[in-house]
Image (cartoon, grey):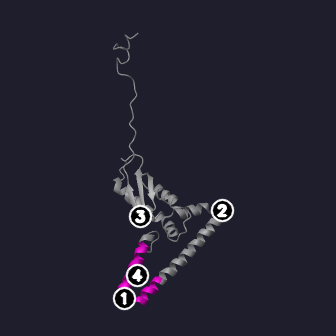
Amino acid sequence: MSGTHGTVTAETAGRLVEDVLDRLAASGDRTACEAAEELVRVLMEFYGAGLARVMDLVERDPGASATRDALLGDELVASLLVLHGLHPEDARSRIARALDGLPQPVENAGFDPATGVLRLRPTGSGGCGCGGTEAVEQAARDALACFAPEVTSVELQAPAPEPVLLQIGSAPPGAGTGGRSPATAR
């Protein structure tokens, strides 16, 4: 895990903590395992309380709406707020926030909270050179992991068919004039 700003995600940190706890469990030292689990629990409570205080202070300041929006729009901060149950937006709003940041526009075609499946449908033209459906799905999964971790699976549906356009233009020569040219139709 790097110490540089912005490179750690909640998912990565969670995996690293689980790995450490698993290694301790494999050592057979039950006392060390229990102490490590307690340490993680205490730190989570401490950081959660700190984040709750930050959000409370921001919510109280009527002039801090830009700060609030910046915090809620930051992937790392948003993931921490969600992790601690402090994010003020509901899942639907957080899903929309995540999808708004994607390089290719998609629409939410339905989220099933029971299964964690989010169905997406591409909007706009598909010929943008964005890398195809796999790139869109991966970008969506990455953004949703931060803003809406309750989304556990993304299914990209086929785009809605575009309506067939009828060409309306001038009539071919002789059409509508009884077979006579326009000059002799008078």
Question: Closer to the observer: label 2 or label 1?
Answer: 1
Residue 102 position in % (x across, y down): 44, 56
Name the amino acid type tagged 4.
Answer: Leu
Q: Where is mark 1, residue-wise?
A: 28
Question: Closer to the observer: label 4 or label 3?
Answer: 3
Secondary structure under tag 4 reads helix
Question: Closer to the observer: label 3 or label 2?
Answer: 3
| Residue 146 in the image: above or below residue 27 | above
Tell me the crowding category of disc 3: few under 14, some 14 to 19, or many 20 or more residues within 10 angstroms, Cα based. some
Q: Where is mark 3, residue-wise?
A: 152
Whole-Å distance between the Cαs marked 3 and 2? 35 Å
Q: Quadrant of residue 116?
A: bottom left
Whole-Å distance between the Cαs marked 4 and 1? 11 Å
Q: Earlier in the sequence, mark 4 or mark 1?
A: 4
| Magenta region includes residue 5 | no
Q: Where is mark 4, residue-wise?
A: 21
Q: Earlier in the sequence, mark 4 or mark 3?
A: 4
Secondary structure under tag 1 reads loop
| Residue 117 in the image: above or below residue 174 | below
Tell me the magenta residue range.
12-37
Name the amino acid type tagged 3.
Answer: Thr
Residue 160 position in % (x across, y down): 40, 46
Which sits in the foreground, 64 or 171?
Answer: 171
Q: Earlier in the sequence, mark 4 or mark 2?
A: 4
Inspect this view and state whether residue 8 appears.
no
Which sits in the foreground, 170 or 176?
Answer: 176
Whole-Å distance between the Cαs marked 2 and 1? 53 Å
Whole-Å distance between the Cαs marked 3 and 1? 33 Å
Q: Where is mark 2, residue-wise?
A: 62
